[in-house]
Image (cartoon, rainbow, N blue to C red):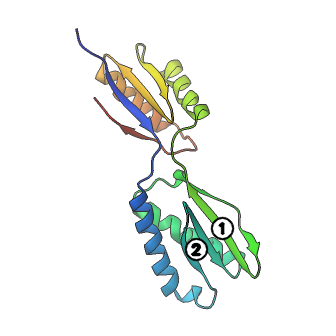
Amino acid sequence: MASDSSFDVVSKVDRQEVDNALNQAAKEVAQRFDFKGTEARIEWSGEAVEMQAVSEERVKAVLDVFRSKLARRKVDLKALEAGDPRQSGKLWKITARTQEGISQENAKKVSNLIRDEGPKGVKTQIQGDELRISSKSRDDLQTVQRLIREQDYDFAVQFTNYR
């Protein structure tokens, strides 16, 4: 009797890639002519990324530079959750965090999609902040992966532990 094949749907970010993108963005902000004299900076602040500049437009430009560096390093931009610009003294700041894990609500959305539109015989199981999907047929699992990729969720998804 054949055993079930499975894979996990996760939402993880490679911290090293984010760190590399942040370093590249900091270097570009320090060197670009349009950021001269704006006190523009981007740096880690604990687990969050802190951006600052003297005007709202400049701090948004720093965020755009950071997003472009993340995209170039193949980090899904849906995993970056940036706050609104806020004024702090004479500087404007934006705090951005990376989203890790799939919430229970989002896992249920994916699970319902698979149950409604996916092939029969595919089982889903929510395990903490990830979703395990299993089936006897590997072809069904590939169909489910394609179905999930085609959806435009507001969180990043990756597939791991394919067995």
| Towards the viewer: 29 or 72 | 29
From the top left corner, tell me how far across and down residue 115 is, in percent: 51, 19
- Residue annotated with mark 1: 94
Label 1's element?
strand
- Of the numbered discs 2 and 1, the one sitting upstream in the chain is 2
Q: Indicate left or right for 93 with 162 as reference.
A: right
For the C terminus, the image quarter is: top left
x 75%, y 82%: residue = 90
- Give the label, 2 or 1, closer to the camera: 1
Q: Residue furthest top?
A: 1
Distance from the alpha carbon under mark 2 to that under mark 1:
9 Å
Q: Indicate left or right for 47 with 93 as reference.
A: left
User: Would you say the residues marked 2 and 1 are in contact, meaning their CB atoms lie under 8 Å apart?
Assistant: yes
From the top left corner, tell me how far across and down residue 24 is, in percent: 43, 74
From the top left corner, tell me how far across and down residue 9 is, in percent: 43, 35
- Residue annotated with mark 2: 62
x 56%, y 40%: residue = 153
Q: Indicate left or right for 59 with 74 as reference.
A: right
Question: Would you call the spot at circle 1 few (<14 residues within 10 Å), some (14-19), or many (20 or more)?
Answer: many
Q: Is residue 11 above or below residue 130?
A: below
x 44%, y 65%: residue = 19
Label 2's element?
helix
Mark 2 belongs to which amino acid? Val
